[in-house]
Image (tube, coloured by chain):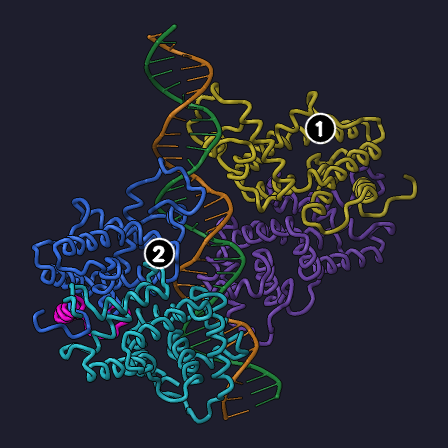
Chain colours: A purple, B yellow, C cyan, D blue, E green, F orange
Amino acid sequence: MTAPRRASPNTARRKEASRRAILTAAFDLLQEVGYAKLSIEGIAARASVGKQTIYRWWPSKGMVIFDAFLMLSEGADGGPPALPDTGDLAADLTAVLRATIAELNDPRYDQPMRALATEIAHDPELAAAYAQRLEGPLQQAKRQRLGSAQRAGQLAEDIDLDVAVEMVWGPVLNRWLLRTGPLTAEYADRVVTTALNGLRPRQPGR
Amino acid sequence: MTAPRRASPNTARRKEASRRAILTAAFDLLQEVGYAKLSIEGIAARASVGKQTIYRWWPSKGMVIFDAFLMLSEGADGGPPALPDTGDLAADLTAVLRATIAELNDPRYDQPMRALATEIAHDPELAAAYAQRLEGPLQQAKRQRLGSAQRAGQLAEDIDLDVAVEMVWGPVLNRWLLRTGPLTAEYADRVVTTALNGLRPRQPGR
Amino acid sequence: MTAPRRASPNTARRKEASRRAILTAAFDLLQEVGYAKLSIEGIAARASVGKQTIYRWWPSKGMVIFDAFLMLSEGADGGPPALPDTGDLAADLTAVLRATIAELNDPRYDQPMRALATEIAHDPELAAAYAQRLEGPLQQAKRQRLGSAQRAGQLAEDIDLDVAVEMVWGPVLNRWLLRTGPLTAEYADRVVTTALNGLRPRQPGR
Amino acid sequence: MTAPRRASPNTARRKEASRRAILTAAFDLLQEVGYAKLSIEGIAARASVGKQTIYRWWPSKGMVIFDAFLMLSEGADGGPPALPDTGDLAADLTAVLRATIAELNDPRYDQPMRALATEIAHDPELAAAYAQRLEGPLQQAKRQRLGSAQRAGQLAEDIDLDVAVEMVWGPVLNRWLLRTGPLTAEYADRVVTTALNGLRPRQPGR
DNA sequence: GCGTAACCGAGACGGTACGTCGCGTCTTTGA
DNA sequence: TCAAAGACGCGACGTACCGTCTCGGTTACGC
């Protein structure tokens, strides 16, 4: 639950079944009809719920979408997420980034994730919720994997881990969202390699 | 003009004043009321134009926004854009990236650019137009500057220039659009440095 | 209480305070916001009562209004109503009709009485209750006064007393409800005179 | 009268077909579902018309109902209405009053006329329109018939014709609207007789 | 140099969705 | 153990825009 903006109604009396039906309906409709045609009325009808029940608990369509993702991620979770750590940083990053790209290319998630991204882009409040509840744990996992590599001497000591994470995922997300180029597994490899080595030439002895 | 979807009307008779009024109105309204409240009716009213005049020449709201940006960029241009080339790649990139960040932070452009970005995210056709007409020349200029550095031995020879460009601008665009962190000039510096050096430690000699 | 439609709950346990609060709130709201904006929710809120308490004891909004009038009339009564009988029929009728008109013109009663009248017009069940509980006794009093006049030879012997009553009060009620003309004391006088004398010319010797 | 309250849109462009469809739908729905369940949405749907088209041209539901009656009455008219004048006032009045009662008892008109009456009772503005456009001509016809009788010496000279009309029709309308008694042809006879003769006893020599 | 066809402003139209209000039912909770 | 409080599914409200479709009126072409 995401704490409606103001004077929240009595949460205790909330009907859990309706909440889940709404979030499921919202996510499913995003897949089926797309973001542009997603309407509160449509969600309510699909969920067999009164519109007011949506307006009562969510301050905006964006928050509904966000909560739908939250429900999904909580459903899948068996605890906090973590990146694989085989000791081979390049391999680990490549694997994870390929998985990310596969998800972004998955037609089940493409439309919904674009919708969420769009809403975040236009609503700072939602962006904050996203940063804290959805992106936060993931970002933390990525930072930890890079931190571990740093301690193993595989990363320069003066690297800002947040910048490092963005250096790897930024190009991919950007290419996906703005469709500035094809999003393939091979691209993941190239991004990881380039990010690790940097743009400047390196000494032959590595 | 952006090639209406079907049998275009006689372009010769098109009223230039109306076209400009529409695009100006669209851009101004984006600043003032934001993307969510931008309506064709609103644009028509602000531009003192019949709605049909908009529907006649543009296939979608996104295309109007796109053309508004196009008009702006053409107004400013004195030919094809080019990045500064002082020989110092890091300095040049930093300067340009700082300028980019300044523009993204400019309240006059923030809302309109977010609108354009999200329309692109949801409309592949618009994305193609964007890639060709607006992003294309800029991307070309960036590639050229990097190519020049590559020839000067300041960039590794096996670098994919597109990936290189995305490595620098991707993190910034991403941070801006999804609000995943503060967007400061100092951030520009760190991104350029990290991208150039890469994440791995470098030998003391250079 | 006015006989709820189905299996009435245990009347003995009914909370008298709530009943009075509801009826008072209903009547007051009718004055203040008018019939069109009168809502069960509004009544419940004003009476600090749960909506269910209203639905439990009254089958319709009309019945609530009706009971509100019933409470008022019972509060005022010191027994069954009776018309004055000074022996002068014309004077007595005129006086009572003027009083009726004064009440109909009283802004405190205008809206509520219109509400009651229109509810009756659309609900035969309510009409029956009205005829029995509110209108009945009054009608009876009027008939008695006319009967007394009949026995005194002031009324033709073949007159149907119900018709006679309607001949006097019908024009007034009609004018009030449908606003077909001004409702003044002078109008009362003319109606009584015309009704008593009839439309046809009379012999000079009365 | 059909002119909306304020700043009426350009009447010239009004679509006559939609206007008629709306009024017909309104009248039909009144018969079928009754006043309580008559909704603007229902009318619009039945008339295959956008809701806005109703809101654009009518200020209230009552005015729609009123206009529906107006259309009906204009459709039937072959000029201004007139009461029969055979010379026998009692017979003429009885015939007309019986016709009135037959119409009031006609299930096709009962609900719609109650609806109109109710709206008039709660909306003075509508009442004025009603008095002028619908009731006016009828009232005029009734007054004329009585005036003719007056000139023929069949009516007392000091009779107020408006009061006379109300003396005859008031009881009937009242009984119908408030359901205070059965509405039969025989009742029409009694009302006419009583009104003509008055309540007081008459001299044997008439 | 004169029709005539197009574009133009205006805005009514049939619709869809909005966000709100109230209905009548059902559930929780505190006195 | 009620009854207040109020969430719920539902339906209608009145408004905002959608994209289409006339309306005159005004250009600017082509005969």
Identify the main secondary structure in magenta. helix
In the shown orientation, is residue C174 left or right of residue B73?
left
- The magenta stretch spans residue C198: no
Whole-percent x and y of residue C84? 33, 82
Where the C terminus of chain B falls, by quadrant?
A: top right
The answer as to whether the residues below labels 2 and 1 share one chain is no
In the shown orientation, is residue D49 left or right of residue B100?
left
Residue positioned 33% across, 61% down in the render: C178
Query: Is B54 located above or below residue A128 in the figure?
Result: above
Please state which of residues A84 and D148 is positioned toward the viewer in this rendering: D148
| Chain holding disc 2 | D
In the shown orientation, is residue B80 left or right of residue D68?
right
Whole-percent x and y of residue C18? 50, 84
Range of the magenta residues? D176-196
In the shown orientation, is residue A56 left or right of residue C99?
right
Q: Label 2, on which residue?
A: D127
- The magenta stretch spans residue D190: yes
Q: Label 1, on which residue?
A: B141
Residue A80 appears in the figure? yes
| Chain holding disc 1 | B
Residue positioned 43% across, 25% down in the render: B9
Residue positioned 84% across, 26% down in the render: B86
Query: Which amino acid type is marked by label 2?
Result: Ala
Whole-percent x and y of residue A42? 46, 57
